[in-house]
Amino acid sequence: MWRPIRIPYADGGADGRTPLHFASLVEIAEFLLTKGADIDARDLNHESTPAQHMVRVEQKRHYPHDRQDVARYLVSRGCRTDLLMAAALGDAERVRRHLDGDPDCIRMRVTEEYFPKLDPRAAGTIYIPLLGAGSTPHAVARDFGHEEIYQILMERTPDNLKLALAAELGDEAVFQEFLMKRPELMKSLTERETEKLPGAARSNNTAAVRLMLSAGWPVDALGEMGATALHWAAFNGNVEMTHDILRFHPTLELKSRDHEATALGWAIFGSGNSWHRDSGDFAGTVRALLEAGALKPPHAEDLEPSDAVLAVLEEQSTK
């Protein structure tokens, strides 16, 4: 008797995906389902379903064409869906269905809050590489060119969230117009809204950070890992963003919840370990923080700084 199989997970292997995860044609997916394949099976590395893997082709060398048609087929067969998937697929009916069932899902983002890891060793949802860490349904709809979906989402979005979304999407005209009409919104920002400032900094979105700060977002608002916008600007080596934030007088010695380090510590560590370690201006960022009065952390050399950052720290020590 035929039974569903799971491809073993191993370093450099198939991430523990099932055959259905690899289906490149509707006919293949249909055949696998008739043989008992689990439509909502999760792979081991990303803990994501076949349909979630299919919202976008990540590596064209494996799939010569887009697989959204296969994802739509799986949706029609009753697979588990979410608002991000519906936005990516341009499925207006399902977008409305999700929002009717849970209006608060309008706040969904590609974060562990909404896609928690069952295994702490897992890499996190496949949406991180496919849609982008921190992405909202609104950003996904815009990214895939589904303007109708974007408008549906905006119609269901609370006003204080609309303000943050306009900043995130770089729509300065809408942001300023909305703020002029509803200036009192800044007094009613919830913790979820204030978290969007460090979230934008984490995504290296300098324009959004600048807009939020100018509108009155609290500069020391905490986000993921209990880190501020300054922590993330430092970790990304974004010297322009760092200067923008410093103009609003952040608390330089505030330590993040995770790692218990200041923004300067994050910059030093990031220079050798950040996603942007090869492109960020970490020497300039560290210099800006030091000139603003940030204290060099003890044993800074143990934070694996780059040679350029190490030179800045040594230069500071001789003054």
Image: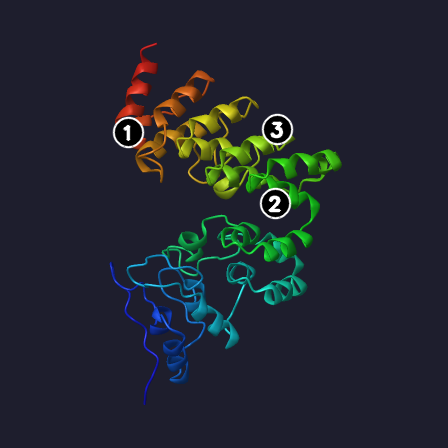
The residue at 44%/56% (across/down) is 127
Name the residue furthest top: 319
**Which disc number belongs to residue 306?**
1
Q: Residue furthest bottom?
A: 1
Q: Which amino acid lies under the numbered mark 2 shown in the image of this protein?
A: Arg
Q: Earlier in the sequence, mark 3 or mark 1?
A: 3
Could you tell me how far apart the alpha carbons at marks 2 and 1 are, in whole angstroms?
Answer: 35 Å
Sequence-earlier tag: 2 or 1? 2
Is tag 2's residue or tag 3's residue first in the polypeptide sequence? 2
As drawn, the label of residue 214 is: 3
Residue 9: percent from left, percent from top: 28, 65
Position of residue 197 measured from the top left corner of the image (x, y, whole percent): 56, 37
Can you say which quadrant of the picture contains the N terminus?
Answer: bottom left
Q: Position of residue 134 (x, y in %)?
A: 50, 48
Q: Is residue 75 left or right of residue 316?
A: right
In what quadrant of the picture does the C terminus appear?
top left
* Residue at numbered disc 2: 192
Task: Find numbered disc 1 in the image and state the secondary structure of the residue it sits on.
Answer: loop
- Please report contact status of discs 2 and 3: CB closer than 8 Å, yes or no: no
